[in-house]
């Protein structure tokens, strides 16, 4: 099932959480991702620091075609292209690389570069970023994000790095589009995932 970039971003904004998988090998990454998707969180990023990550992305995309699977820690054009060919629907970087943006967009992928300051946010948006990854979020706070968004209300921000199940609601309340959360979500704890999704997406 193909998706446009705006559809990918809509899914991320609707779920308000991106589950981040880092594992010792491709098999472990696939297992963690599939468990997360089956639990109800169908937006998952596989970090390319995982050995065999591209193979894992391909297997997850084949097994759960309805899910939105992304590649994380994408630093250059060749890796961006390989991630796209493996079936990734979005790319995430810890910093801003215009080659990753242009390559991702060439293949129809949403791209979320890493930023840490207002200047970097504006530069990323001017470069065509679909959203920005505030990283590491542990060096910031929901109050800082709230101040940033007072000046840059047009910036779709996804804080990542130091986000926990406990503090994610505060980041969303401060204006984050979604939060990137690692092992606390992708460890296979069904109750934790469902509770967080319900908390961040209360039924009207």
Image (cartoon, rainbow, N blue to C red):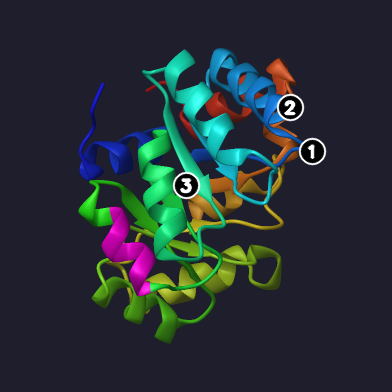
Q: Position of residue 171 (x, y in %)?
A: 56, 54
> From the viewer's perspective, is the residue at label 3 or at label 1 nearer?
1
In the image, which residues are magenta?
A: 98-104
Dividing the picture into quarters, in which one does residue 139 lie? bottom right
Q: CA distance from mark 1 to mark 2?
A: 7 Å
Q: Which residue is mark 3?
A: 178
Q: Tell me if mark 1 has few (under 14), some (14-19) or many (20+) residues whose alpha carbon lies within 10 angstroms of its own.
A: few
Q: Tell me if mark 2 has few (under 14), some (14-19) or many (20+) residues whose alpha carbon lies within 10 angstroms of its own.
A: some
Q: Tell me if mark 3 has few (under 14), some (14-19) or many (20+) residues whose alpha carbon lies within 10 angstroms of its own.
A: many
Left or right relative to 98: residue 187: right
In this view, 21 is above or below 128:
above
Left or right relative to 31: residue 95: left
| Foreground pick, 85 / 109 | 85
Q: Position of residue 57 (x, y in %)?
A: 52, 32
Residue at x 26%, y 21% (from the top left corner): 1
Q: Is residue 151 magenta?
A: no
Q: Which residue is mark 2?
A: 28
- Picture quarter with the C terminus: top left
Q: Earlier in the sequence, mark 3 or mark 1?
A: 1
Dividing the picture into quarters, in which one does residue 130 lie? bottom left
Q: Secondary structure at mark 1?
A: loop
| Foreground pick, 146 / 126 | 126
Q: Earlier in the sequence, mark 2 or mark 3?
A: 2
Left or right relative to 4: residue 155: right
Q: Which residue is mark 1?
A: 24
Is residue 135 among the parts visible in the rendering? yes
| Foreground pick, 7 / 27 | 27
Residue at x 44%, y 24% (from the top left corner): 61
């Amino acid at each position: 099932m193909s998706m446009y970039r705006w559809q990918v971003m809509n899914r991320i904004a609707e779920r308000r959480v991106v589950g981040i998988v880092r594992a010792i090998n491709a098999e472990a990454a696939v297992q963690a991702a599939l468990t997360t998707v089956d639990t109800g969180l169908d937006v998952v990023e596989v970090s390319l620091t995982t050995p065999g990550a591209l193979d894992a992305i391909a297997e997850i995309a084949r097994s759960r075609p309805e899910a939105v699977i992304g590649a994380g820690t994408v630093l250059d054009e060749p890796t961006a292209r390989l991630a796209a060919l493996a079936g990734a629907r979005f790319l995430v970087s810890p910093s801003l690389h215009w080659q990753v943006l242009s390559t991702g967009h060439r293949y129809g992928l949403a791209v979320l570069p890493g930023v840490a300051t207002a200047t970097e946010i504006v530069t990323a948006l001017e470069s065509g970023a679909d959203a920005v990854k505030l990283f590491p979020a542990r060096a910031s706070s929901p109050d800082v994000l709230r101040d940033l968004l007072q000046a840059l209300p047009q910036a779709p921000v996804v804080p990542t790095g130091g986000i926990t199940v406990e503090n994610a609601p505060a980041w969303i309340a401060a204006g984050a589009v979604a939060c990137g959360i690692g092992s606390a979500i992708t460890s296979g704890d069904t109750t934790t995932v469902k509770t967080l999704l319900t908390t961040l997406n209360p039924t009207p």
